[in-house]
Image (cartoon, coloured by chain):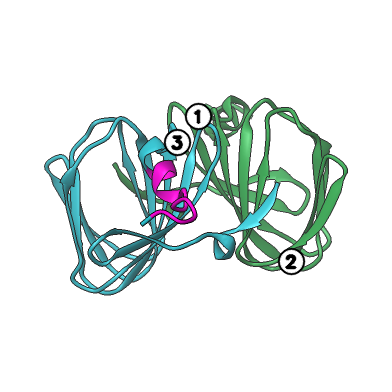
Chain colours: A cyan, B green
């Protein structure tokens, strides 16, 4: 019932993107550290996404609209809408996905002991 | 698609609790300013709740477990589990509710022009 992102193992998602995840049955909460210049290629997913820039400046494109997002700015990305971005500076971004990101849950599972 | 809590009207929820809401069809995101000493009476709701203390210290009880939550600490409150709390210091708390808080959506609607 009580936890912290500090308790979560950092996972490299993409070059320049390192995330810590808290999953529930229905949602995924993600704290992402982004290196300056890192690029988020265009992609989409069924999961609705809330993104808030906590630190830094991130250029985000949702569909055909591009915005420069600064601390406090929030983006709401509907299901299956293509989005992409670029870190203008190093950033910390908080994301919420609904339903939970089952693909990210798999990344969170540590490799079996003794496997390569 | 792009917004900010700064764009949202602050709403007094309870004595000492002032919230700004961003609602989607499926979730409610809430940034709450809490005055020192303010009390959250025990209550419960069907909506699952994620709460993260951003600033300050908040004593939170979920079911029978009480914790002192500091910045970065996260609480996950399952559907219909009673919870209560007390602000040890002034706090800023970020909450996510799933499904959306239909009761809070009604609070967000400004009174009709000309009504009392």
Q: Is residue A28 left or right of residue B73?
A: left
Q: Is residue A109 visible?
A: yes
Q: Nearer the viewer, mark 1 or mark 2?
A: 2
Q: Is residue B39 visible?
A: no
Residue farthest to the right, as pictured? B64
Mark 2–mark 3 distance (CA, rounded to whole Å): 29 Å
Please report the bounds of the magenta region as a residue range. A104-115
Residue that badge 2 annotates: B57
What residue lies at 49% left-to-right and 33% top-to-bottom?
Answer: B27
Q: Secondary structure at mark 3?
A: loop
Q: Quadrant of the C terminus of chain A?
A: bottom left
User: In the rendered image, which quarter is residue A59 located in?
Assistant: bottom left
Q: Is residue A102 magenta?
A: no
Q: Secondary structure at mark 2?
A: loop
Residue B101: x %, y % from top left: 58, 30
Disc marking residue B113: 1
Q: Residues within 10 Å of mark 2 (few under 14, many from 20)?
A: many
* Mark closest to the chain's N terminus, 1 or 2: 2
In the image, residue B94 above or below residue B62: below
Q: Is residue B13 left or right of residue B83?
A: left
Residue that badge 3 annotates: A100
Q: Is residue A99 left or right of residue A78?
A: right
Given contact means CB atoms under 8 Å apart, are the residues at marks 1 and 2 in contact? no
Could you confirm whether marks 1 and 3 are on the same chain? no
Given contact means CB atoms under 8 Å apart, are the residues at marks 2 and 3 in contact? no
Residue A30: x %, y % from top left: 44, 52
Q: Nearer the viewer, mark 2 or mark 3?
A: 3
Mark 1–mark 3 distance (CA, rounded to whole Å): 41 Å
Viewer-nearest residue: B13 or A116: A116
What residue lies at 84% left-to-right and 48% top-to-bottom?
Answer: B65
What residue lies at 52% left-to-right and 37% top-to-bottom?
Answer: B28
What count of labels does the image hold?
A: 3
């Amino acid at each position: 019932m009580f936890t912290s992102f500090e308790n979560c193992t950092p996972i490299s998602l993409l070059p320049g993107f390192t995330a810590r995840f808290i999953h529930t049955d229905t949602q995924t909460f993600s704290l992402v550290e982004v290196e300056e210049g890192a690029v988020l290629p265009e992609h989409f997913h069924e999961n609705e996404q809330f993104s808030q820039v906590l630190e830094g400046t991130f250029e985000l494109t949702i569909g055909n609209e591009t915005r420069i997002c600064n601390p406090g700015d929030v983006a709401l990305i509907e299901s299956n809408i293509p989005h992409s971005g670029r870190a203008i500076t190093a950033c910390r971004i908080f994301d919420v996905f609904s339903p939970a990101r089952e693909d990210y849950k798999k990344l969170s599972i540590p490799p079996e002991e003794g496997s390569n």
